């Protein structure tokens, strides 16, 4: 019930995913410390807002610890920026870039360590931190004409394939037992709130956390849609894929909604199966697909599951496992 022609992702407008407007110095201030000050304020605002809600969290113990760790990381990042600002007169463009690269490295290391596996909220906090650092770095680079080697090129990861409007994703290697894809129930609730009325389409980012895959950013890419089917909006899909590339995540989960009710309505159609084959030509063999219906059933399916490359683990409350790979929100 879903169609996405292969040529629909060509000629994608590859504008910036994150607006740098908040980092622009409208007073033409040439002091790189000015950008660091704005970065510190943005991190502090996020931290204060998050701390107000953490006492009311009812997530599992591991999830709450991961959230606390992500906020501690955010706090440490801000304090490092403030420490540097104490020597404001010594901060040049190159010094600021070096500081930001160091902090970006710390966040990336923690993301890849697996500590955020069971908590999309914690992963979201970490991605917020790294995105803020990235935006500040880009502003300073452009303001002072500093050329750096992109991190993805350093790691020999593909950014854009020649002649293509969207990034290719590196396949994730798997061991004999495959990898678990960890999905928090809050992500399923978000999907349920975004996918109806049917049919709509969402793609989600995954990040390798130890031996597992944690699902993080969710992107609505719905284009032309009706109860007979849905097509991805080429521009929205392109932006989502570029966002994943920039944050060193990958296209991990493809979800769309079906009309009808009950678990049988979540079975993939022949069009869905053909679409999966098209996805697998260009993206990770660990891609997982899912179909959700209005009465809150969701089925995870695809070659990666059939071949045990990936197994699904849903964590958090408010969801029941009906049978293997089929769940229902309360």
Image: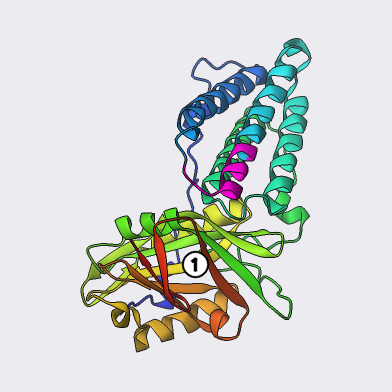
Instruction: Tell me the SS state at disc 1.
Output: strand
Rendering coords of residue 28 (x, y %): 55, 17
- Identify the residue under disc 1: 253
| Front residue of this view, candidates 307 and 62 | 62
Quarter occupied by residue 91: top right
Measured as percent of width and height from the top left, residue 21 is found at: 47, 31
Q: Residue 41's quadrant in the figure?
A: top right
Tell me, yes or no, whether the highlighted magenta stretch contains residue 62. Answer: yes
- Position above or below: 69 against 9: above
Q: Quadrant of the C terminus?
A: bottom left
Q: Is residue 157 above or below residue 139?
A: below
- Quadrant where the N terminus lies? bottom left
On the image, the x and y values in percent for residue 228 come to 22, 77
Q: Is residue 164 visible?
A: no
x 43%, y 61%: residue: 237
Instruction: Name the residue rendered at 58%, 41% in the picture.
Output: 67
Bounds of the magenta segment: 58-69
In the image, residue 67 lies in the stretch drawn in magenta? yes
Q: Quadrant of residue 235?
A: bottom left
Q: Is residue 108 left or right of residue 29?
A: right
Whether residue 166 is situated above or below residue 171 in the rendered picture: above
Name the residue nearer the viewer: 327 or 26.
Answer: 327
């Amino acid at each position: 019930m879903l169609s996405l022609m292969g040529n629909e992702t060509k000629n994608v407008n590859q504008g910036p995913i994150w607006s740098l407007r908040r980092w622009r110095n409208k007073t033409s201030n040439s002091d790189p410390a000015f950008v660091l000050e704005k970065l510190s304020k943005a991190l502090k605002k996020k931290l204060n807002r998050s701390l107000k809600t953490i006492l009311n969290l009812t997530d599992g113990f591991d999830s709450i610890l991961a959230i606390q760790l992500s906020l501690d990381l955010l706090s440490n990042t801000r304090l490092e920026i403030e420490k540097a600002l104490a020597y404001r007169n010594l901060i040049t463009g190159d010094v600021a870039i070096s500081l930001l690269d160091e902090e970006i490295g710390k966040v990336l290391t923690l993301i890849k360590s697996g500590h955020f596996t069971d908590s999309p909220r914690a992963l979201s906090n970490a991605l917020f931190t790294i995105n803020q650092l990235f935006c500040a770095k880009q502003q300073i680079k452009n303001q002072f004409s500093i050329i750096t080697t992109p991190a993805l090129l350093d790691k020999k990861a593909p950014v854009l394939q020649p002649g293509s409007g969207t990034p290719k994703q590196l396949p994730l290697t798997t061991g004999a037992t495959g990898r678990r894809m960890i999905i928090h129930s809050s992500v399923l609730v978000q999907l349920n709130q975004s996918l109806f009325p049917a049919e709509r389409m969402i793609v989600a980012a995954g990040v390798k956390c130890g031996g597992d895959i944690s699902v993080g950013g969710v992107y609505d890419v719905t284009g032309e849609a009706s109860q007979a089917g849905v097509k991805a909006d080429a521009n929205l899909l392109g932006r989502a894929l570029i966002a994943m590339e920039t944050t060193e995540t990958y296209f991990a989960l493809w979800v769309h909604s079906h009309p009808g009710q009950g678990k049988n309505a979540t079975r993939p159609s022949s069009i869905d199966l053909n679409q999966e084959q098209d996805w697998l030509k260009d993206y990770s063999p660990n891609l997982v697909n899912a179909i959700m219906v209005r009465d809150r059933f969701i089925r995870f399916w695809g070659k990666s599951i059939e071949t045990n490359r990936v197994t699904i683990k849903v964590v958090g409350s408010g969801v029941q496992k009906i049978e293997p790979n089929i769940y229902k929100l309360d």
